[in-house]
Amino acid sequence: VVKESCPNDGKKHVIIEWQSFPSGHIANNKRDYRVNRQHKWLSMKADEIANNEEAMQQPANMTAFVQAYSPYMDIKFVVLSRPFLEVMASHPHYDNGPEKHSNIVRGFLIILRRFLDSHMYDLVE
């Protein structure tokens, strides 16, 4: 994968992997490594979601990504964030309503926080 995405040709390469998370099913998604939303997350608490193996792989396992690619390249993550209420208002029908949707999003914010806390990062505001 590294050879295809960043060939050793003396040029700089940029890989842009985008996806908001928790992401849903994307029609015609050619990235089969993605884990789609799980129905069971609807009945789980935020901390249970944050400790769920499938959730930690979604939309991709960031730790595994760093381990696989860091020997070959510098890796930068750009985390874009917006106010929590705006996130909830943008998809009021997701996950059977805003209460369950907010719970799932909180679970993924815990996953993201753990990842960022375990890796060096620069804050740019």
Image (cartoon, helix red, strand yellow):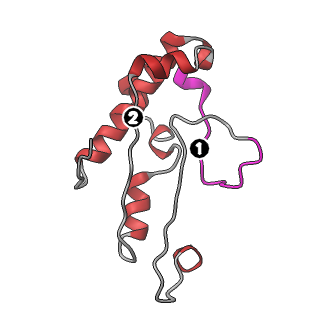
Where residue 77 sits: x, y (%)? 38, 54
Q: Quadrant of residue 73?
A: bottom left
Query: Do we see residue 124 in this rendering?
Result: yes
Q: Residue 46: x, y in percent?
A: 39, 23
Name the quadrant containing residue 40: top right
Q: Distance between the residues labelled 2 and 1?
A: 22 Å
Q: Name the residue under label 2.
A: 81
The residue that appears at 42% across and 69% down in the rendered structure is: 69
In depth, the one of 20 and 96 nearer the eye is 20
Q: Which mark identifies residue 27?
A: none
| Residue 82 lies in quadrant | top left
- Name the residue carrying label 1: 35
Image vertical order of residue 104 relative to residue 125, above or below: above
Q: Describe the element under mark 1 as helix, strand or loop.
A: loop
**Measuring 35% from the left and 70% from the top, which residue is drawn there?**
74
**Residue depth check, mark 2 versus mark 1: number of the one nearer the observer:** 2
Please give the range of residues in magenta.
27-42
Going by the numbered disc 2, the residue's amino acid type is Ser
- Residue sticking out furthest to the right: 28
Q: Where does the N terminus fall, quadrant-wise? A: bottom right
Q: How crowded is mark 2: few (under 14 residues within 10 Å), some or many (20 or more)?
A: few
Which quadrant, please, contains the C terminus?
A: top left
Magenta-drawn stretch contains 68: no
